[in-house]
Image (cartoon, grey):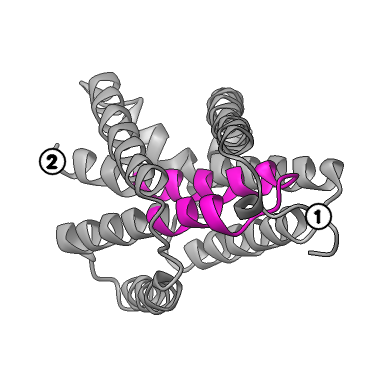
Amino acid sequence: MGNYIQINSISEIERVDFYKKTYLHVAYGVLAFVFIEYFMLSSDAIVKLALSLTQGKMWFIMLGGFMLATTYAEKMAIKSHDRNKQYLGYLIYIVAEAFIFIPMLYVATNIDGGAQILKQASVLTLSLFTGLSAVVIFTKKDFSFMKRFLTIGFFIALGLIAAGLLFGFNLGLWFSVGMIVLAAGSILYQTSNLVHQYSTDQYVAAAIGLFASLMLLFWYILSIFLSRD
């Protein structure tokens, strides 16, 4: 990364400052997600569009658009040392996440006990995220070896999702459990990158990786909670 200072070459005090900036930006991302989601759910036109994309094979369009947007946003932030590009990439990622969450959150906000379900899912998600991140930060263990397994796991998951859409079968509870395990592994991997891989000016890029893993974990925890009703 040229002359940029690597995280593993700085003092412990500077490391802590980098961690604080990163997790503060994860928190900003969550707050932005909440506000953007509230705006989207308040718009009948946006909700109608999002719900229409959940019908049959139209879900492929939703997933495809989401993957293109998030991949582009992530590359924009991670490969650039330009702060403006990093923030733009983060914003694109948050908006994409907010849009794909519309159908699930629309259901959650329109059923009896939905507010309690959202609260429980949020608390569990944040607890797991905090615990997994703390394990890596305090032990400084390198989980970069997990990249290969996570890549294989996500490709298998995408294949199963595609098969479910094409042949009309429900992936069920155990698929969601498996995705939670993958999301947990992704949190360990992304936190490991935070500790070992980034340069000191890339706290926004580091925040995107953690935010993405957090939202994936929240998606499948919430889906399990909703499936109980």
Q: Quadrant of residue 55?
A: bottom left
Disc 2 residue type (three-letter): Arg
Q: Is residue 206 magenta?
A: yes
Seen at 32% across and 45% down, the residue is 135
Disc 1 residue type (three-letter): Tyr
Label 2: element kind: loop
Q: Is residue 75 magenta?
A: no
Q: CA distance from mark 1 to mark 2?
A: 49 Å
Residue behind mark 2: 228
> Of residues 220 and 207, which is closer to you in this image?
207
The disc placed on residue 4 is 1
Label 1: element kind: loop
> Of residues 106 and 79, which is closer to you in this image?
79
The label nearer to you, 1 versus 2, is: 1
Q: For the stretch drawn in magenta, what is the main secondary structure?
A: helix
The quarter of the rendered structure image containing the C terminus is: top left
Residue count near mark 2 (Cα–Cα under 10 Å), binned few <14, some 14–19, many ≥20: few
Seen at 48% across and 62% down, the residue is 59
Q: Is residue 40 left or right of residue 217?
A: right
Residue 124: x and y, percent? 25, 33
The quarter of the rendered structure image containing the N terminus is: bottom right
Q: Earlier in the sequence, mark 1 or mark 2?
A: 1
Residue 147: x and y, percent? 45, 72
Position of residue 90 relative to residue 29, above or below, is: below
Q: Is residue 178 left or right of residue 25?
A: left
Position of residue 120 relative to residue 188, above or below, is: above
The disc placed on residue 108 is none
Q: Residue furthest front?
A: 11
Residue range highlighted in magenta: 188-217
Position of residue 30 relative to residue 140, above or below, is: above
Seen at 41% across and 33% down, the residue is 106
Residue 61: x and y, percent? 57, 64
